[in-house]
Image: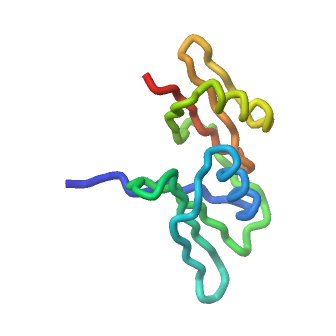
């Protein structure tokens, strides 16, 4: 048997990304790993203590240019118990980048340009 474990986003400014994910989605660090030579740092975020799935943020010390996300035809999705309140919070943060009222979903954009879908409990 196999199970999902984690998904990775490479980030340019780790502190900024950590702050965004905590403020926007309530994600907190579960664990981290720093290279002995300081060349990279990995931080694994979770949405709750017992969550089996984590978002890995990878920071590379020598990276100075934003990442090319191509056409961005991929995304990570979160299900929100209080969809309307979260939507209002994200609008106030200015991170809503696309809304699809017909489907009842919207997307937010993180500091590096990754899109995150927010779906209500159905």
Q: How is the image coloured?
A: rainbow
Q: Does residue 99 appear to the left or right of 56 in the view shown?
A: right
Residue nearest the viewer, comparing 72 with 99: 99
Residue drawn at x 43%, y 22% is: 122
User: Residue 41 location in percent, x, y?
Assistant: 62, 73
Residue drawn at x 40%, y 56% is: 50
Residue nearest the viewer, comparing 68 with 28: 28
Which quadrant: the N terminus?
bottom left
Up/down of 17 relative to 86, above or below = below
Residue drawn at x 53%, y 16% is: 103
User: Residue 66 location in percent, x, y?
Assistant: 75, 55
Up/down of 38 relative to 80, above or below = below
Count all numbered tags in the image, as a single digit: 0
User: Residue 119 location in percent, x, y?
Assistant: 52, 28
Spot the residue most to the left. Answer: 1
Q: Does residue 92 appear to the left or right of 7 in the view shown?
A: right
Residue drawn at x 53%, y 41% is: 76
User: Residue 24 location in percent, x, y?
Assistant: 68, 44
Residue nearest the viewer, comparing 43 with 37: 43
User: Picture quarter containing residue 11?
Assistant: bottom right
Spot the residue most to the bottom. Answer: 36
């Amino acid at each position: 048997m196999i199970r999902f474990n984690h998904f990775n986003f490479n980030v340019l400014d780790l502190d900024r990304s950590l702050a965004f994910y905590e403020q926007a989605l309530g994600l907190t660090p579960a664990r981290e790993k720093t290279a002995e030579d300081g060349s990279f740092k990995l931080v694994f975020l979770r949405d709750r203590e017992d969550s089996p799935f984590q978002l890995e943020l990878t920071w590379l010390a020598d990276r100075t240019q934003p990442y090319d996300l191509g056409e961005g035809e991929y995304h990570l999705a979160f299900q929100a118990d209080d969809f309307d309140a979260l939507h209002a919070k994200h609008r106030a943060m200015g991170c809503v980048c696309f809304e699809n009222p017909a489907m009842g979903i919207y997307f937010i954009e993180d500091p590096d340009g990754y899109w995150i879908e927010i779906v209500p409990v159905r």
